[in-house]
Image (tube, grey):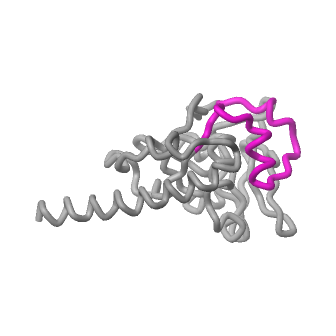
Amino acid sequence: MLIRSAENRADNMGALSAELERQADVYRGLGVQKDAIMRLLTPRPDRLPKELSIPVVTLGASVDLDSQARFAGITPYFDLSRAYNTAGGITYAQPRLIWMQDGEKNKGRSVEYVRAHLTGNERPATLADGIALAITQPDIKYILRNHAIDLPGSAVGSDLAPNLRGFHGGLELGRGFFGGAHPNWGSASSGS
């Protein structure tokens, strides 16, 4: 049994390596070196909740968020420099491999509710995490047809959280009230 687990872990590392290479190719368009991404290759921490299953390289603050949003084709409807981290959200200074869930599990729950009910090593996804998800996930427009994504680890003003949504085939960054819940909106979370 132990050998089988080691083989599965090696298979998982091979798949993760291929995924990071794909993301590194995408990030080349922002001037990020492939080596900077490939150095992040580490196994998914066992302590993370199982829902955090999407590997995402976030550039954090190492590349201006406006530049990242433009690169992803996102139209922001607020000044991104006004957003700040809150409720345990973390924007890293350098690229980092994080593990995310895209908000599907939190559809219909308010940002306030999600912030209060995170489990274990789960943290609320930030604006930087949401932009990274849009950059790295080729199926982001499909995901956003199913639900918009609240980013509860960031705030804009005193009672608004940023959100990522699809609109007429494009991507938008908007903001919504912490206490509002909608069946087609869900808060993303992450861990590392």
Q: Nearer the viewer, residue 57 or 119?
A: 57
Q: Residue at x 80, y 30 (%)?
A: 81
Assign the N terminus to one quadrant of the image.
bottom left
Q: Quadrant of residue 63?
A: top right
Quadrant hosting residue 167: bottom right
Expressed as whole percent of the image width and height from the top left, the position of residue 177 reads: 78, 43
Depth check: give the residue in front, 20 or 157.
20
Query: Residue 143 placed where, x, y %?
Result: 66, 67
What are the residue bounds of the magenta stretch? 58-85
Left or right of 11? Residue 180 is right
**Image point (19%, 62%), residue name:** 5
* Magenta-drawn stretch contains 75: yes
Residue 136 vs 151, above or below: the answer is below
> How far across and down, in percent of the image, does residue 116 sit?
55, 40
Q: Is residue 55 magenta?
A: no
Looking at the image, how many numbered discs can be counted on the residues? 0
Question: In the rendered image of this protein, does residue 56 appear above or below residue 153?
Answer: below
Q: Nearer the viewer, residue 117 or 132?
A: 132
Q: Which residue is drawn at the image coordinates 55% and 37% (left, top)?
A: 95
- Which residue lies at the image location 63% right of the left edge and 55% below the top edge? 26
Say which of 16 and 101 sits in front. Answer: 16
Q: Is 24 on the left or on the right of 162, as rendered?
A: left
Quadrant of the image for the C terminus?
A: top left
Image coords of residue 62 (percent x, y) = 64, 32
